[in-house]
């Protein structure tokens, strides 16, 4: 995906959440609604998360150093993982605690009863615009890929994170509106507490999903099966490569793929010819897959018995 599209979605979500957080806090101060407090903390946590994603994007653009020869592309994964922790701890656990507190000591909403309803309706409208921006930017890169597959397989973490955050925010706002509305209708404060509990469970679930997916990226994911096939076809398209003995790929960052392969070259070729064929193979790979920026090709003579016993031969593809 383009970093520009992810940044646009992050900024839209950040501006929306900052405005929503202020209005929710005002509503909580006026009414004492626990759902409004939980939603206020949720919006503050989301705003901080978007700030972390922007910081991660900026730090990932640092130049490579001798200590970090492959650069800092994975900073985007690290900050996305921190986002999941913040969403779980500050957003989800706080909402669950507040829901428990209000359930134990329920209080009806007496003052300014119209305020939380108005604030939640306005927040739903603003959050919908942010969610729409995330959907539009995601559609530019996901093509016909189903949404669940896109979120699970995306190598750039920003759009999936913003999508899940915005979806969670919208559902949370609806839950808060139901809790507040039922409290106003029945006069029972435990409806407000129930809405707060539901918001907490929702945020914890989203945080766990984000943590699992981002952890996989941090551990190191290989190219997708489609990209692996494109690399293999590019390698074998030249006469100087007889076969691929084994190959491994690894994402160094969302837009940088490492390709390492041992290739079989003709026995009769001289060193200069082998070097020329390797250069041509690297060019073909980059043309087929521009994000393959770091390529290591090791020439060898194909020996069936040796290849069959090689431990590397059993790990031809890294998991996508």
Image (spheres, rainbow, N blue to C red):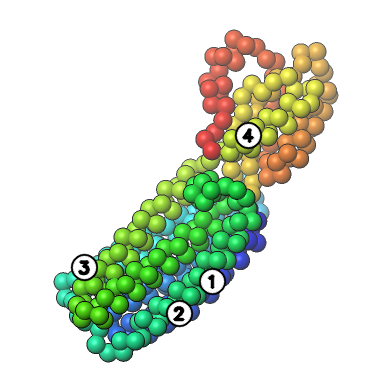
Looking at the image, residue 17 sits to the left or right of residue 69; the answer is left
Mark seen at residue 122 = 2
Tell me the SS state at disc 2. helix
The reply to whether dot 3 and dot 4 touch (C-beta < 8 Å) is no
Tell me the SS state at disc 3. helix
Q: Taking 210 as reference, is 224 above or below it?
A: above
Mark seen at residue 228 = 4
Tell me the SS state at disc 1. helix
Question: Dot 3 corresponds to which residue?
Answer: 100
Q: CA distance from mark 1 to mark 4?
A: 37 Å
Residue drawn at point x = 78 percent, y = 36 percent: 283
Which image quadrant is residue 33 in? Answer: bottom left
Q: CA distance from mark 3 to mark 4?
A: 50 Å
Q: What residue occupies the far bottom of the structure in this picture?
A: 111
Which image quadrant is residue 245 in? Answer: top right
**Horizontal and vertical percent position of residue 194:** 25, 68
Q: Taking 126 as reference, is 138 above or below it?
A: above
Tell me the SS state at disc 4. helix
Residue drawn at point x = 19 percent, y = 71 percent: 103
Q: CA distance from mark 2 to mark 1?
A: 11 Å
């Amino acid at each position: 995906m383009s970093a520009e599209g992810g940044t646009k979605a992050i900024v839209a979500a950040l501006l929306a959440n900052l405005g929503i957080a202020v209005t929710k806090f005002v509503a909580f101060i006026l009414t004492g609604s626990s759902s409004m407090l939980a939603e206020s903390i949720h919006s503050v946590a989301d705003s901080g998360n978007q700030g972390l994603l922007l910081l991660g994007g900026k730090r990932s653009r640092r130049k490579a150093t001798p200590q970090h020869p492959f650069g800092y592309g994975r900073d985007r994964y690290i900050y996305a993982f921190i986002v999941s922790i913040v969403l779980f701890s500050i957003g989800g656990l706080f909402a669950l605690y507040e829901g428990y507190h209000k359930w134990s000591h329920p209080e009806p909403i007496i003052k300014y009863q119209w305020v939380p309803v108005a604030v939640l309706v306005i927040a739903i409208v603003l959050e919908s615009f942010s969610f729409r921006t995330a959907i539009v930017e995601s559609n530019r890169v996901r093509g016909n890929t189903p949404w669940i597959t896109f979120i699970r397989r995306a190598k750039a973490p920003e759009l999936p994170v913003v999508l899940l955050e915005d979806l969670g925010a919208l559902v949370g706002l609806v839950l808060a509106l139901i809790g507040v509305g039922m409290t106003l209708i029945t006069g029972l404060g435990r409806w407000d507490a129930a809405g707060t509990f539901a918001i907490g469970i929702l945020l914890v679930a989203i945080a766990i999903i984000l943590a699992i997916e981002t952890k996989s990226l941090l551990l190191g994911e290989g190219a997708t099966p489609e990209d692996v096939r494109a690399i293999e076809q590019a390698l074998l398209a030249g006469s100087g490569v007889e076969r691929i003995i084994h190959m491994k790929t690894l994402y160094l960052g969302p837009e940088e793929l490492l390709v390492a392969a041992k290739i079989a070259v003709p026995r009769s070729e001289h060193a200069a010819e082998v070097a020329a064929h390797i250069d041509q193979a690297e060019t073909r790979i980059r043309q087929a897959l521009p994000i393959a920026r770091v390529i290591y090709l090791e020439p060898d003579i194909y020996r069936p018995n040796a290849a069959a016993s090689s431990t590397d031969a059993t790990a031809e593809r890294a998991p996508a």
